[in-house]
Image (tube, rainbow, N blue to C red):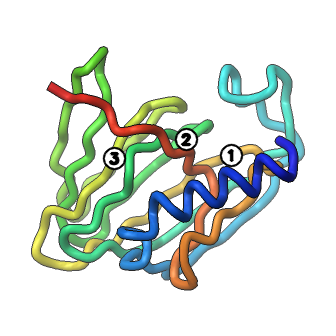
């Protein structure tokens, strides 16, 4: 990805997330690099260096992470709180799952989804994923940064 495109993508991400990301807060962000990982259809078609991210963050009640996908598999554990994870299952069709404290879910590469804190308390999320190293980390606000999040337009779910 060219430098100009990275800057443009970063600006779009910040603009789209400014309403919600300011309430999101990093607790821990750990990054490590693997020399070679094949992202299949979500990469260039050959193995590239990847960044493994293990991330703990909070979401206040009512906070939402906009519709997005990941290029690598993601593992999510909800340590505290209640979330709704909504994902696309077909054209104009979405499915929702309630996730409660102590529960976990897996997001396959390319799964378009959103997450909303529907509870009355702050949610604490642990998230692990891998993304192409060249995609970098996006600083959504002074309190929240992450890698491996690729925003999409909200679907028309029926």
The numbered mark, 2 or 3, whose residue comes first in the sequence reads: 2
Mark positioned earlier in the residue sequence (3 or 1): 3
Give x and y (percent) for residue 11.
63, 60
| Front: mark 3 or 1 | 3
Answer left or right for 127 relative to 10.
left
User: Of label 1 and label 2, which has the lower sequence position?
Assistant: 2
Q: CB atoms at circles 1 and 2 under 8 Å apart?
A: yes
Question: In the rendered view, does 10 fall on the left or right side of 152?
Answer: right
Q: Quickly name the residue at label 1.
A: 131
Q: Which of 84 and 152 is in front in this view?
A: 152
Reading the image, the residue beneath label 3 is 114
> In front: 14, or 25?
14
- Does dot 3 land on a helix, a strand or a loop? strand
For the point 60% across and 73% down, the residue is 29
> Callout 1 environment at 10 Å: few (<14), some (14 to 19), or many (20+)?
many
Q: Mark 2 points at which residue?
A: 70
Given residues 62 and 81, the one toward you in this image is 62
Is residue 102 positioned above or below 60 on the image?
Answer: above
């Amino acid at each position: 990805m060219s430098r100009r495109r990275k800057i443009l993508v970063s600006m779009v991400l910040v603009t789209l997330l400014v309403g919600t990301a300011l309430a999101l807060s990093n607790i821990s962000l750990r990054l490590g690099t693997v020399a070679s990982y094949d992202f299949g259809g979500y990469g260039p078609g050959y193995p590239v260096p990847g960044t493994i991210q293990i991330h703990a963050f909070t979401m206040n009640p009512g906070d939402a992470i906009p519709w997005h996908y990941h290029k690598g598999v993601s593992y999510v554990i909800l340590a505290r709180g209640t979330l709704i994870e909504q994902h696309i299952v077909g054209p104009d069709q979405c499915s929702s799952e309630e996730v409660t404290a102590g529960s976990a879910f897996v997001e396959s590469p390319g799964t378009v989804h959103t997450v909303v804190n529907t509870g009355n308390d702050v949610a604490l999320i642990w998230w692990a994923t891998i993304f192409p190293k060249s995609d970098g980390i996006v600083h959504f606000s002074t309190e929240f940064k992450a890698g491996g999040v690729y925003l999409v337009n909200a679907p028309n779910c029926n």
